[in-house]
Amino acid sequence: MFPFSFLYGIIILIRNYLYQTKIYGSVTYDFPVICVGNLNTGGTGKTPQVEYLIRLLQKNNYLPATLSRGYKRKSVGFILADANSTADLIGDEPLQYFKKFKNIFVAVAENRILGIADLLASSPNIDAVILDDAYQHRAVNAGFNILITRFDDLFTNDFLLPMGLLREFRNGAKRANAIVVSKSPINISAQEKQKIISSIRKYSTAPIFFSFIKYAEPFSFFTTADINKNLETVLLTGIADHKLLMKQIELNNKKVIPVSFSDHHRFEITDLEMMHRAILKEGKNWNDYNLITTEKDAMRLLPFKFWFEEKKINLFVMPIEAEFIADDKNNFDQLILQYVYQSSHDEQ
């Protein structure tokens, strides 16, 4: 794969050079625009980080909005989420933000410049825009860039596509205003933290924070049923990496049977029927299992509520949140709030 990575790298170098020399223009805004992204492809934990920012801003009386491209949606152009939105229309993650939070504007657009303009035109009271997965969208010069890298898959150990999973060279980290090492162990040692910080320091001087995934109790998605922790679990997912979630469920359950599809998989009835037949083939029924999925997958399973009701299958959703380790939380919060406050007042 090296020759292909070499060619891809040449293209990335030329593209970044054109932006750095301002041959390609980028738009700067006089209000808070926070970009959340990564150098690797998928699975770094952007969605929990975006949700963390939403909670932080709302807690401090700001009205936030999110703007995504709406990955794998069937629509095109700018769309502002409303009560009739579906995953096919706006994408699973934007739909999750819209359904999970009150007093938030959620929009999708391929062109982030036009998307921000349309978002502000339709919702002028917005205090801050969070760009989801836009780190490589150089046409928008976000005021604050948050780079996410996963604890067990650091960008410092990776290579360019297709030889590795990097979208751009490691030194792209220098554009970050903050770097979050996501999915860290909650009991990470000071030595391990310092080792990771030292490896990142080769590419960026941005402050580095460590976060972990906090799991809540699964809740019934279509009904009010209670989960039975004494049962084995069938874990239905279409995400980049289900291993952490699987380990978490195994802590409280006898056994976990994974039924996994590719990231952002668009579920079909045939997928559900295949899973159903496999359970029956084992001589069991759904009373012997808990069926658990993720919040993001649940958005793509919404159209099949009728199927779950018909089969009398309870679908449980495992909520997750990003949380910061020790003093990192206060330091990260202050950095974000200081940026938003300063940008808001600069506008005035």
Image (cartoon, helix red, strand yellow):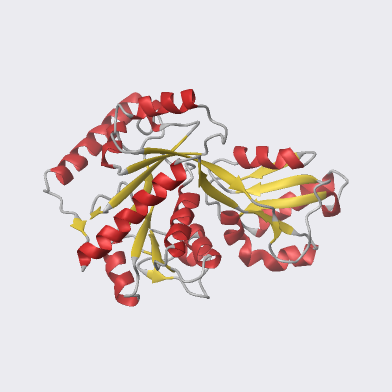
The tally of labels here is 0
**Quadrant position of the N terminus in the picture:** top left
At a point 21% along the width and 62% down the height, the residue shown is 346
| Residue drawn where x is 74% and y is 66% of the image | 223
Which quadrant: the C terminus?
bottom left
- Above or below: residue 109 compared with residue 180: below
* 148 on left or right of 280: left
Nearer to us in this view, 11 or 167: 167
Q: Residue at x 72, y 58 (%)?
A: 315
Q: Nearer the viewer, residue 83 or 30?
A: 30
- Residue 155: give x, y in percent of width and height: 39, 32
Could you tell me residue 293's position as x and y percent? 65, 52
Q: For the point 38% across and 65% down, which residue is it?
A: 76
In depth, the one of 85 and 230 nearer the eye is 230
**Residue 133: in sight, yes or no?**
no
Q: Is residue 119 visible?
A: yes
Q: Position of residue 264 (x, y in %)?
A: 52, 51
**Residue found at the very far right of the displayed protein:** 283
Residue 271 placement, left or right of 344: right
Instruction: Work out whether 172 lies above or below 270.
Output: above
